[in-house]
Amino acid sequence: MKQILYLFFLASVTLVNSQNNQPIIPKEGKLITDFVPRKWKIIAKSEGDLNKDKMNDVAFVIENTATENIILNEGLGKDTLNVNPRFLLVLFKTESKYVLKSINKKFIPSQDDSESPCLEDPFKENGGIEIKNGILNIDLHYWLSCGSWYVTDRKYKFRFQDNSFVLIGYDSSSFHRSSGESESKSINFLSKKKELISGRNEFEESNPKTTFKSIKIEKLIKLEDLTTDSEIDY
């Protein structure tokens, strides 16, 4: 009997944790806070007109605050890791309410990473979100206190067209903190051009090489299809 009660309790806890990590987000609401589930919080927000109707739309990131997602770390790095999930939401403003236009549950990385415990928060540590000139910009910054000398920056630009947010620009750069070697690439998905800069050194005089290439892409990448593991390379 005790074993049955324990299994029932374990199943109940698992179900609650699952629901807390994957809450139901409403399709519309009068306030931005209407889209924030219980025990979640807003960690970043930006406002601006994204669909050219002269009304302030909102893009923001919410994070779960469940203590079950604070895990112990016995290796290098922090003693505990916050692996609470984060969702990216984009709301369109109307005369009387906000409407959920896009949501991505797998793109914004968590504060910590159990597989890379020395990684600083990619989103909050020199990263973030901004709406500027009708474009949604998301920046991620990868810096590790141990395990790697490389610092990597990734910048994504999204535009609303054909009823979806699509990736129109992507910039990536990497820098080796010991050698000073760095390289970067910039992709314009509208012009289908890629710029590569290699052979640059931040610590000494160098002769970097810049090359331009055309890329082949059949359709633009949608915001909702991106994950933290998505590789942008053409």
Image (cartoon, rainbow, N blue to C red):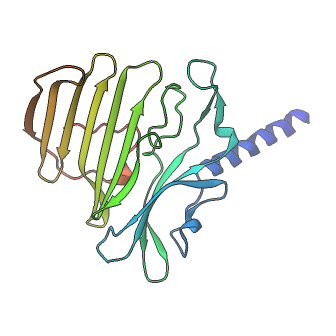
- Work out which residue is located at the far bottom of the displayed protein and give it: 95
Query: What percent of the width, then of the height, locates residue 92?
Result: 41, 71
Q: Quadrant of the N terminus?
A: top right
Query: What percent of the width, then of the height, locates residue 159?
Result: 27, 60
Query: What percent of the width, then of the height, locates residue 60?
Result: 47, 58
The residue closer to the viewer here, 173 or 13, is 173
Q: Residue at x 15, y 34 (%)?
A: 196
Residue 30 left/right relative to 224: right
The residue closer to the viewer here, 151 or 87, is 151
- Work out which residue is located at the far right of the displayed protein and give it: 1
Task: Report the label total.
Answer: 0
In the displayed structure, would residue 196 be above or below residue 33? Answer: above
In the displayed structure, would residue 93 be above or below residue 62? Answer: below
Residue 207 left/right relative to 73: left
Query: What percent of the width, then of the height, locates residue 57?
Result: 40, 69
Residue 111 left/right relative to 18: left
Q: Which quadrant of the structure image shows residue 233?
A: top left
Q: Quadrant of the C terminus?
A: top left
Q: Residue at x 48, y 50 (%)?
A: 105
Residue 227 left/right relative to 183: right
The residue closer to the viewer here, 112 or 100, is 112
Q: Which quadrant of the structure image shows residue 85?
A: top right
Q: Which quadrant of the structure image shows residue 153?
A: top left
- Work out which residue is located at the far front of the displayed protein and give it: 204
The residue closer to the viewer here, 134 or 37, is 134
Q: Residue at x 35, y 60 (%)?
A: 131
